[in-house]
Amino acid sequence: QKEVEQDPGPLSVPEGAIVSLNCTYSNSAFQYFMWYRQYSRKGPELLMYTYSSGNKEDGRFTAQVDKSSKYISLFIRDSQPSDSATYLCAMKPEVQGIQGAQKLVFGQGTRLTINP
Amino acid sequence: ETGVTQTPRHLVMGMTNKKSLKCEQHLGHNAMYWYKQSAKKPLELMFVYNFKEQTENNSVPSRFSPECPNSSHLFLHLHTLQPEDSALYLCASSQGPGLEGDEQYFGPGTRLTVT
């Protein structure tokens, strides 16, 4: 079983729709959760970062973490064609010391297309 | 230049060649990373450097040799690669361990093709 599971898609929705992207994970030690956006031929760009459980909102983006279900989500409201990209979830545990502290585990990425 | 830069952006090399990838970060960070991104696979961490010292080697074959001369520069030396090493190689940097979150910021990557 992979540590982080993410549906690779592709996911195609009309402009203005609400988009829901999800990841599940198996390691209960994960405490830090991130969402990255990667445009074609570019490196991943950090979108959202949350620590432990709860919600975080930034403009049209909302990140949710449900540690009891080992499930994280990214919601995009009023989706725009410019949101078309691959979205990667990433997570890591809270560890003492340096070893392993920076080892992010990524999902496979979901390719999203917003149609005008 | 701002953020994390990588050169070259594209590289085609034969299996007997030796080449190097370069990464530079302009963020004042203390940690730098190499990742491999292959089609239909998650990003794979290869190496981590903190304050120029290697702190992670994720069981990477010896044909990949990293070098970190200072906190701003990171190299990946390549020799006798295999076609399956063709991928996007991404460099990232972060402030360093012990800082909350320690978010990683990525460069644009080098698209490597091994023929």
Image (cartoon, coloured by chain):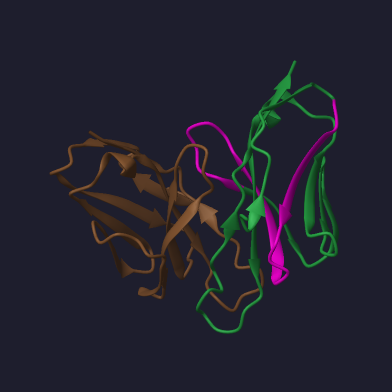
Chain colours: A green, B brown
Q: Residue at x 84, y 30 (%)?
A: A78
Q: Say above or below: A111 vs B6.
A: above
Against B80, residue A66 (above or below) is below
In x, y percent, where is residue A13? Answer: 77, 23
**In which quadrant of the rendered image does the C terminus of chain B lie?**
top left
Task: State the residue lying farthest toward the bottom.
Answer: A97
In the image, residue A57 above or below residue A78: below
Residue B56 among those drawn in magenta: no
Above/below status of A83 relative to A64: above
What percent of the width, then of the height, locates residue A109? 62, 42
The residue located at (55%, 59%) in the rendering is B104
Q: Identify the image quadrant of residue B64.
A: bottom left
For the point 51% across and 50% down, the residue is B43
Q: Is residue B88 left or right of residue A35?
A: left
Q: What span is colored magenta in the figure?
A: A17-45
Based on the picture, tell me whether residue A20 belongs to the magenta stretch. Answer: yes
Question: Viewer-proximal residue, B1 or A8?
Answer: A8
Task: Say which of B39 and A35 sits in front.
Answer: B39
Spot the residue most to the front.
Answer: A1
Residue A15 screen position, x and y as percent = 80, 21
Q: Does residue A60 appear left or right of residue B1 in this picture?
A: right
Number of labelled discs? 0
| B8 displayed left or right of B27 | left
